[in-house]
Image (cartoon, grey):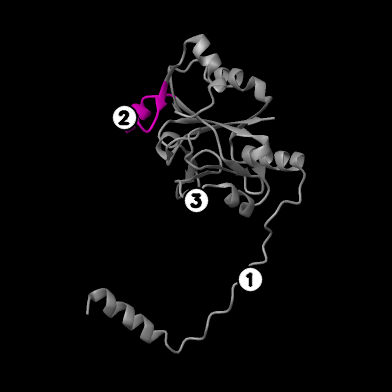
Amino acid sequence: MSAREDIMNRIKSALSDAPQAPMVPRAYRRSSTMTAQQRLEQLVDRLVDYKANVFLTPTAEAGARVAQLLAGSSAVVVPHGLPQEWLNALHDAGTPAVHVDSPERPLSVAELDAVDAVVTGAATAVSETGTIMLDGSAGQGRRVISLVPDRHICLLRAADIVEVLPEAIARLEPTRPQTWISGPSATSDIELERVEGVHGPRTLDVIILL
């Protein structure tokens, strides 16, 4: 008998006369009751409360907004499947330098650490919790590209905003690695002083495409 089997048998023996655990009620909400406008307003409220920067932008002006936010930056990383129209204004201006992360040419951590920002899309967002979700698809890229750079510019289509978590889960591709984002990376020390940028980007810019 292995040590693991011995430990598991002892646990089973100790719990043999324990009462049966009651069934967990699962009558939680699974669908939205809000209108699209209410979901949008709730998400914006949550994101602002989390100290994210939010920009409501017509879809046709997405590229101009990205270029505006990256003014003064020297280098940016993007996933290989990011819509080209979101980057056209950057290419026209010639700055910043755009580094593409792809399965064929994944950037190293050192290369990612050297850029000023990352620009990605998003799979969905939950307005109730203010959580934006990336599922690793071509327009969102590897998890590491949204975690190493100090600034994350995330483009989210308003049509992809849902109200509650079960709706978002149904939209995600379960076989892909996921990143759930609720505001910029932050933590608090023992004196409850907020420190940003500890586990990911210090700045989160969310462009919501209308």
Q: Earlier in the sequence, mark 2 or mark 1?
A: 1
**Quick one: 80 or 61, which is closer to the camera?**
80
What's the CA distance linking mark 2 and mark 1? 47 Å
Structural crowding at the residue carrying mark 3, measured as other residues with C-alpha within 10 Å and reported as few (<14), some (14–19) or many (≥20): few
Q: Earlier in the sequence, mark 3 or mark 1?
A: 1
| Residue pictured at 63% horizontal, 71% vertical | 25
| Residue pictured at 38% horizontal, 83% vertical | 12
Q: Which of pointers 3 and 1 indicates the residue nearer the eye? A: 3
Q: Quadrant of the C terminus?
A: top right
Asked if residue 10 is positioned above or below residue 86 in the image, the reply reads below
> What amino acid is found at the position of numbered circle 2 in the picture?
Ala
Q: Horizontal and vertical percent for residue 187?
A: 48, 45
Q: Which of pointers 2 and 1 indicates the residue nearer the eye? A: 1
- The image quadrant that residue 42 belongs to is top right
| Residue pictured at 59% horizontal, 37% vertical | 51
Which residue bears the numbered disc 2?
110
**Quick one: 83 or 42, which is closer to the camera?**
83
Q: Earlier in the sequence, mark 2 or mark 3?
A: 2
Which residue bears the numbered disc 3?
174
